[in-house]
């Protein structure tokens, strides 16, 4: 990403609003932007979804291929997640090898899915120690208006939820990817003394710190990531967890129904 | 390619009546749909579906060219980056550029450099990004056609749109706009791009085997199809700007906007000078 | 207009042949083989023997005399570098300010991230831009907020003889400055700013084109529950 000078007016404006409980786009602090999900967007992918979170637009594709298992999990399928922040999506994205930002994004999305055991990987074993199904989740940013973490993780979950294992390639019948859990990440940004859910780009640009909490359908925590140079108090983290549990419910429903 | 199995060797790509596997005649295009102005952050953008191809194009610029040593003091650089999403093809493609996409990016950049008034924006670059989201042969033609609309959407001055199309040879017959199976099993493919108004060819590639007469036939098909595609490009731009046009027209009927003096509001400037300033 | 409806001019697209009979090619056009063509998306306007294409999109290209809103992105011992929302960064020389800035002292006056109102004093052939803040109406902007719109929409936001801005001000009471580079600074009470920002967004998104002024007036009259005191503008489409 190219460095960008933040206008002091923007910083003051957002801070001033936040001090009175307001946001630039009129949302409440714990209110995410509207989420739309289109599943099965790409026919060449085994699963896919295009997700719009406000003006942030992400396309996620899942490809499923035969490969080798890891030696320590000989009878389990493999999950691999990558993200491309292509320069089409933002004037601040540059072509080139994955930036630390893209790698962090892919890893945080991966962690939520992996740690909540979203996919039953034992059902992806073909021949123990030799052949398993490998899931490649590829996150492709199309329009960047803040909070790629959540948009990408909703896209990944939606794409997995409609994915089919192409077992016909090995002479069997295709079957739906065995999805067992629905982890939802909720990211919030710290602005002044306030914590705002689903920061838009302007908010993200001035945020001191960022926190992502991924919870499952029981409200249990499955992954977390604190980012940026600022800090959170323990109470703020606890509040972020409660918010993630509460806000995540509605978002999970949208993704399940899509 | 892994798709081969479903096509028996003896199967004809085009039958005795001149009908292709997907039901088209030899001179028929796949369905094309174009929409301009689909992205928020880009200065110009377009989405295009062409058969089973899905392509997004975005234009940023003219903007300061980076790195600085690339800047041309006399003109703008037109820099295209063609990229395929990993899930756009049947076998996952590793993210990032490969030799094929670098070459395609280069020839598309050159095609656009032929029509953009680059001398109007010295030291800048006009960056054209093509993302292939779903691929089914002909992605460079689809990408270039979309990018051309995105350039116009971005307000980049140019001599004309550029329109692209391919023809090739399948089962011994010269045919327009090959799909993936035809591309894989056909005898030749010849993508081109043209400046429709003048007939200038600004991109031309070919691989396979054609006689000179077959090449002429292929070009005739492509040029004819480019005229149809050109109308779709223009229609997408008209739809994009239709609502703005009428109101803007009223502005145009009076003095030109640039002459509009900002006189109506010298703001009451806040007393904002740093304290030190008062001491000086 | 009265009686005769004006000719509806369509959007022109690069490469369109323009009816430039007896006219010279103006901005947004080019001459090829004695004919005039559109070089960009826009609508056609004729004036003073020229045929122009008024753009509907595109980045801001600096012109001498334009008043713009800029952002300080860097500084040197005797100048600042200003992002003016264009392909060209613009240096502001310390001499072009109302202050007596000593060498190396620039950051006492303007810092990276500060937003200023300034004037473009010159643009040379290589598009090197010079800014000035010397006139007393210019300076650093504090408070308020900056909204970005397409620079091509700036004339519409200003309106005929400033009518649109006057309308927005009449209702919302905001302080407002429209930079030619598509940056709009507004400040005022929260309600006024809210409505003004809404109207600016509507204008930027353009909406249904005929009667934009009417649309804005209707919105503001509804929002504030009173009628505009400025007379309804005669729109060119003959509706009034």
Image (cartoon, grey):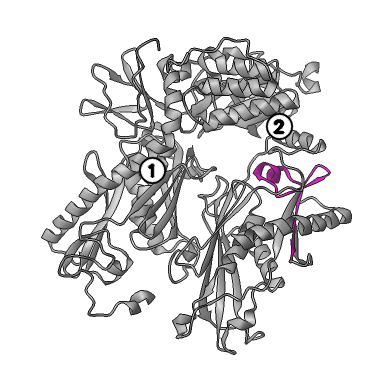
Q: Quick check: A79 above or below B133?
A: below
Q: Which mark is residue A206?
A: none
Residue picked out by circle 2: A9
| Label 2: element kind | helix
C-beta proximity under 8 Å, tags 1 and 2 = no
Residue B188, horizontal then vertical, whole percent: 23, 65
Asked whether the viewer can see residue C174, the reply is no
Residue sitting at 38 percent across and 41 percent down? B236
Is C84 displayed left or right of C46 in the figure?
A: right
| Subunit that carries the residue with mark 1 | B
Where's residue A77, x and y in %? 60, 80
The magenta stretch spans residue B70 = no
Residue at position x 68%, y 60% from top?
A: A252
Q: CA distance from mark 1 to mark 2?
A: 35 Å
Classed neighbour count for the residue bearing mark 2: other residues with Cα under 10 Å, few (<14), some (14–19), many (≥20) = many
SS under mark 1: helix
Q: Camera-side residue: C110 or B154? A: B154
Identify whether B187 is placed above or below A102.
below
Q: Classify the position of the C terminus of chain A by image quarter.
A: bottom right
Q: What residue sits 42% from the left and 28% below the top?
A: B245
Residue B109 appears left or right of A181: left
Residue named by callout 1 = B149
Q: Report whether mark 1 lies on the same chain as mark 2.
A: no
A207 or A121, which is in the foreground? A121
Question: Which of the pair B196/A164 is nearer the observer?
Answer: A164
Q: Residues within 10 Å of mark 1 (few under 14, many from 20)?
A: many
A215 in the magenta segment = yes
Residue nearest the viewer, comparing B156 with B39: B39
- Residue furthest out toward the left: B213
Which span is picked out in magenta?
Answer: A190-216
């Amino acid at each position: 990403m190219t460095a960008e000078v933040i206008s002091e007016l923007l910083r003051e404006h957002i801070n001033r609003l936040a001090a009175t409980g307001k946001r630039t786009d009129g949302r409440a602090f714990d209110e995410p932007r509207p989420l739309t999900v289109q599943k099965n967007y790409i026919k060449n992918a085994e699963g896919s979804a295009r997700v719009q979170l406000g003006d942030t637009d992400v396309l996620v594709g899942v490809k499923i291929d035969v490969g080798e298992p890891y030696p320590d999990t000989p009878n389990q399928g493999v999950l691999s997640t990558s993200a491309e922040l292509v320069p089409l999506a933002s004037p601040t994205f540059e072509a080139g090898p994955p930036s630390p930002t893209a790698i962090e994004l892919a890893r945080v999305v991966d962690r939520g899915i992996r740690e909540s055991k979203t996919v039953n990987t034992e059902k992806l074993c073909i021949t123990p120690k030799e052949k398993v199904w490998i899931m490649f989740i590829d996150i492709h940013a199309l329009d960047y208006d803040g909070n790629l973490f959540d948009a990408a993780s909703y896209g990944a979950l939606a794409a997995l939820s409609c994915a089919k294992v192409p077992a016909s390639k090995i002479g069997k019948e295709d079957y739906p990817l065995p999805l067992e859990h629905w982890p939802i990440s909720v990211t919030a940004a710290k602005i002044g003394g306030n914590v705002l859910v689903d920061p838009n780009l302007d908010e993200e640009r001035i945020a001191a710190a960022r926190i992502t909490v991924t919870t499952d359908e029981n409200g249990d925590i499955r992954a977390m990531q604190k980012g940026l140079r600022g800090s959170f108090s323990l109470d703020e983290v606890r509040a972020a967890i409660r918010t993630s549990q509460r806000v995540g419910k509605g978002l999970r429903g949208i993704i399940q129904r899509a | 390619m892994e798709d081969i199995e479903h096509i028996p060797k003896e199967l004809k790509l085009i039958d005795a009546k001149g009908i292709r596997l997907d039901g088209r005649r030899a001179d028929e295009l796949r369905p094309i749909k174009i929409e301009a102005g689909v992205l928020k952050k880009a200065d110009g953008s377009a989405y295009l579906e062409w058969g089973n191809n899905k392509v997004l194009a975005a234009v940023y610029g003219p903007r300061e060219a980076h790195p600085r040593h690339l800047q041309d003091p006399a003109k703008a650089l037109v820099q295209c980056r063609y990229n395929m999403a990993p899930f756009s093809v049947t076998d996952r493609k590793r993210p990032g550029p490969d030799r094929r996409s670098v070459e395609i990016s280069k020839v598309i950049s050159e095609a656009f450099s032929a029509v953009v008034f680059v001398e109007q924006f010295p030291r800048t670059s006009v960056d054209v990004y093509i993302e292939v989201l779903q691929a089914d042969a002909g992605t460079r033609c689809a990408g270039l056609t979309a990018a051309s609309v995105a350039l116009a959407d971005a307000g980049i001055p140019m001599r004309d749109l550029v329109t692209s199309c391919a023809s090739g040879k399948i089962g011994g017959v010269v045919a327009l706009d090959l799909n993936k199976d035809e591309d894989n099993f056909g005898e030749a493919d010849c993508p081109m791009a043209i400046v429709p108004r003048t007939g200038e060819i600004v991109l031309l590639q070919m691989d396979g085997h054609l006689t000179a007469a077959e090449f002429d036939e292929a070009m005739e098909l492509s040029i004819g199809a480019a005229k149809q595609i050109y109308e779709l490009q223009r229609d997408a731009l008209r739809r994009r700007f239709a609502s703005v046009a009428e109101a803007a027209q009223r502005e145009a009927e009076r003095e030109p906007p640039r002459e509009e003096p900002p006189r109506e509001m010298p703001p009451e400037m806040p007393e904002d000078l740093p304290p030190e300033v008062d001491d000086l | 207009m009265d009686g005769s409806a004006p000719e509806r001019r369509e959007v022109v697209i690069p490469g369109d042949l323009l009816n430039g009979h007896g006219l010279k090619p103006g901005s947004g056009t080019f001459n090829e083989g004695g004919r005039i063509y559109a070089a960009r998306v826009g609508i056609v306007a004729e004036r003073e023997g020229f045929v122009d294409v008024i753009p509907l999109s595109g980045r801001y290209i600096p012109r001498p005399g334009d008043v713009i809103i800029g952002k300080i992105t860097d500084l040197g011992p005797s100048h600042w570098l200003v992002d003016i929302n264009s392909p060209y960064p613009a240096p502001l020389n310390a001499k072009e300010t109302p202050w007596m800035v000593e060498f190396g002292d620039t950051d006492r006056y303007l810092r990276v991230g500060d937003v200023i109102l300034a004037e473009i004093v010159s643009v040379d052939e290589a598009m090197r831009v010079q800014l000035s803040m010397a006139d007393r109406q210019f300076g650093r902007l504090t408070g308020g907020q900056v909204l970005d719109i397409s620079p091509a929409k700036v004339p519409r936001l200003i309106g005929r003889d400033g009518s649109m801005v006057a309308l927005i001000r009449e209702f919302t009471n905001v302080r407002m400055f429209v930079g030619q580079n598509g940056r709009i600074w507004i400040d005022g009470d929260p309600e006024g700013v809210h409505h003004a920002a809404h109207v600016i967004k509507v204008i930027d998104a353009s909406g249904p084109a005929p009667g934009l002024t009417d649309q804005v007036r209707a919105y503001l009259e509804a929002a504030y529950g009173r009628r505009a005191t400025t007379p309804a503008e005669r729109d060119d489409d003959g509706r009034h």
